[in-house]
Amino acid sequence: MYATSQFPLATPTHKVVESVLKARSAILGDPLLDLRTVRAALGNCSYSYLRKLIADGSLPTFRLGRHGHHRVRQSALQALLKKGDNHGQS
């Protein structure tokens, strides 16, 4: 029987710690941008166009607080720019 009432972990502890650190570095390495910065990166597009991108899911966002302050991951913005649509630029 085991010395404690818990069973040993199926995954070694160092592997669990490494995977958590890798996930944390991926999150911290991808900063959140406010919508003003996103608009500037998209060629100063209109706010209504930006809201349309958010509503149809083309630009995934995070809402901070109850009042709808959105933040966009830099990788999501780069993926949208790679699609090559005109995004408000003339």
Image (cartoon, rainbow, N blue to C red):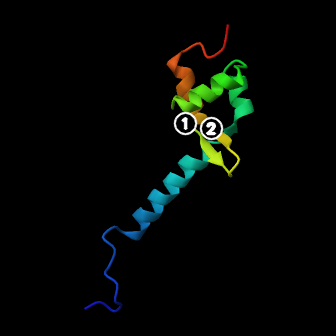
Tag 2: residue type?
Val
Residue 38 horizontal/vertical position (percent): 68, 29
Distance CA(mark 2)–CA(mark 1): 7 Å
Residue most extreme to the left: 1
| Amino acid type, residue under disc 1 in the picture | Pro
- Given residues 32 and 21, the one toward you in this image is 32
Compared across the picture, whether 83 is left or right of 69 comes to left
| Residue wearing tag 1 | 60
Residue marked by disc 2: 72
Query: SS at mark 2?
Result: strand
Q: Position of residue 37 (x, y in %)?
A: 73, 31
- Looking at the image, which residue is at 36% across and 69% down? 12
Residue nearest the viewer, comparing 20 with 43 = 43
Q: Are marks 2 and 1 in contact (CB under 8 Å)?
A: yes
Q: Kindly state the secondary structure of the residue where label 1 is placed.
A: loop
* Neighbour tally class for label 2: few under 14, some 14-19, many 20 plus, Cα within 10 Å: many
Residue that protrudes farthest toward the top in the picture = 90
The residue depicted at 61 percent of the width and 49 percent of the height is 28
Q: Quadrant of the image for the C terminus?
A: top right
**Does 73 sit left or right of 6 as displayed?**
right
